[in-house]
Image (cartoon, grey):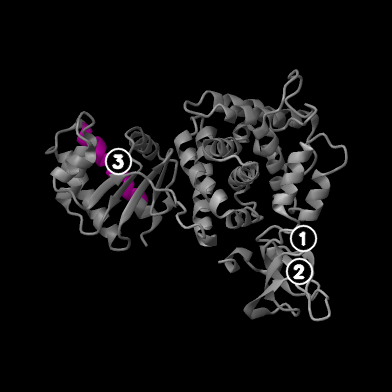
């Protein structure tokens, strides 16, 4: 695989060659030298990777799944230029010739041509360079499984980071990039919710901001789907959930990550993110109308306490109420820089406190039933001291899931995992297995999802 630095130089030279061809004629020495350099870099890179796929996601440039540095203004400008021209990826295949690269650069630089770029390249005999749209991972098989879910989830987290960084830089987050990944997540929610929900249970904090965005979107769409919402409405819920915290791009990190209780002044700064988020989304073209509403409302409780304050009488949007539940649940279970994630039973106790005005009680009850006591993908310890991963929930008894046992009672890895239906009884009518507690995967050095394929 080529080094990221080589990719970076390749894209820089491609952008420079296109810029040169837009300013000078094709025989100008500057253009010729640019194409010569580009040819050498492409030939070298293709010895390691075939093909080379240069993708443009918002202001990001990604080459063969590696994100390039954002610091170069040229790359950001090149990405925006490609986005404006609806070019999401450029694919260069092994065997590409200097002549093909020359014609590609010339035709790409010609913005006045009436014919589509692909047709012009075909006419010029350019067969080893193609342009097109990025196909975000889709799920065709209803039993897609954990690996397909991993790919979609990973793409979603990368897209969330792109949207966040664009907003943080003062630009408008790209609604089309968000829509594409929401489409893929929505399909998984409908086709393989088990695998996708298991992925949201990972307790990583190194990219908490972006995984939280995706997790809240997934958990919100799962709730909406359980209410029989589907199609465009399901996707609009997912979109609004993904963008609910975008206003935090303006919140100082020392406030976001402070381990101690916030001062009154710091809390005032934190509360501003709901207003900032609504402003960012409202002024972004093609942004669904529901998104700024949810960004503004998601910290309001059922009695309209919370924040923003003094907003008068209003009925909270259904999507807001769903997102609020998902937001708090995912925040409490996630590891943060300043604290460990809480176990499921502790989270349920916090969220279901008697007479709490925080959540719609009917929606919360539905959510608790949806997640189960031990959600799929959770590592658990059995009464026998064996450790395994929850692979299915019992439809009638949330205390008795199906567990794939991975570690024996001595903590040794099982040669062959054992599938335990904890609801089954032995000849004497007694349960052989019982779930005792959830287990932190890091404590036993296991990735539970790798055993769910």
Please state the total of marks drawn on the protein image.
3
Q: Is residue 342 left or right of residue 105?
A: right
Res 397 label = 1
CA–CA distance in space, label 1 to label 2: 8 Å
Mark 1 residue element = loop
**Residue 255's image quarter?**
top right
Q: Is residue 379 visible?
A: yes
Tell me whether the residue at label 1 lies in contact with that at label 2, contact meaning CB atoms closer than 8 angstroms.
yes
Dot 2, crowdedness within 10 Å: few (<14), some or many (≥20)? some
**Residue 306's image quarter?**
top right
Q: Is residue 346 left or right of residue 333?
A: right
Q: Position of residue 156 (x, y in %)?
A: 52, 47
Mark 3 residue element = helix
Q: Is residue 19 magenta?
A: yes
- Look at 71% across and 32% down and name the residue there: 270
Q: Position of residue 308 (x, y in %)?
A: 72, 25
Q: Is residue 99 left or right of residue 155?
A: left
Res 423 label = 2
Magenta span of residues:
8-22
Q: Is residue 47 above or below residue 352?
A: below
Q: Of callouts 3 and 1, which one flags the residue occurring earlier in the amino acid sequence?
A: 3
Q: Is residue 244 above or below residue 388?
A: above
Q: Position of residue 407 (x, y in %)?
A: 69, 76
């Amino acid at each position: 695989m080529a080094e990221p630095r080589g990719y970076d130089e390749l894209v820089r030279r491609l952008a420079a060659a296109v810029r040169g061809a837009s300013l000078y004629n094709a025989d100008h020495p500057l253009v010729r030298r640019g194409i010569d350099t580009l040819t050498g870099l492409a030939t070298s890179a293709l010895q390691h990777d075939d093909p080379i796929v240069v993708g443009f996601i918002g202001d990001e440039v990604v080459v063969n799944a590696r994100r390039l540095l954002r610091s170069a203004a040229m790359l950001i400008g090149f990405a925006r230029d490609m986005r404006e021209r609806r070019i999401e990826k450029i694919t260069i295949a092994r065997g590409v010739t200097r002549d093909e690269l020359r014609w590609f650069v010339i035709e790409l630089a010609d913005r006045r041509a009436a014919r589509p770029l692909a047709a012009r390249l075909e006419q010029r005999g350019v067969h080893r360079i193609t342009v097109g749209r990025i196909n975000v991972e889709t799920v065709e098989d209803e039993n897609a499984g954990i690996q397909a879910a991993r790919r979609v989830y990973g793409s979603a987290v990368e897209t969330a980071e792109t949207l966040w960084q664009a907003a943080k830089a003062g630009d408008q987050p790209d609604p089309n990039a968000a829509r594409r990944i929401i489409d893929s997540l929505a399909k998984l929610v409908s086709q393989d919710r088990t695998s996708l929900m298991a992925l949201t249970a990972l307790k990583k904090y190194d990219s908490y901001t972006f995984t939280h965005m995706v997790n809240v979107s997934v958990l919100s769409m799962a709730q909406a789907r359980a209410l029989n919402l589907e199609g465009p409405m399901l996707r609009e819920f997912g979109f609004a959930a993904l963008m609910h915290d975008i206003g935090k791009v303006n919140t100082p990190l020392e406030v976001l990550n402070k381990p101690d209780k916030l001062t009154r002044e710091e809390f005032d700064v934190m509360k501003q993110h709901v207003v900032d988020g609504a402003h960012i989304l409202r002024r972004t073209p093609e942004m669904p109308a529901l998104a700024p509403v949810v960004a503004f409302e998601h910290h309001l409780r059922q009695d309209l306490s919370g924040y923003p304050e003094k907003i008068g009488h209003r009925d909270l949007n259904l999507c807001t109420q769903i997102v609020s539940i998902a937001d708090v649940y995912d925040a409490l279970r996630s590891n943060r820089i300043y604290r460990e994630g809480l176990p499921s039973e502790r989270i349920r106790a916090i969220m279901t406190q008697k007479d709490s005005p925080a959540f719609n009680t009917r929606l919360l009850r539905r959510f608790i039933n949806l997640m189960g006591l031990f959600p799929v993908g959770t590592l658990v310890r059995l009464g026998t001291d064996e450790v395994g991963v929850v692979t299915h929930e019992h439809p009638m008894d949330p205390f008795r899931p199906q567990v794939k046992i991975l570690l024996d009672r001595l903590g040794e890895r099982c040669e062959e995992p054992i599938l335990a239906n904890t609801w089954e009884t032995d000849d004497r009518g007694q349960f052989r297995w019982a779930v005792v507690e959830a287990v932190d995967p890091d404590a036993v050095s296991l990735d539970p999802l790798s055993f769910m394929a």
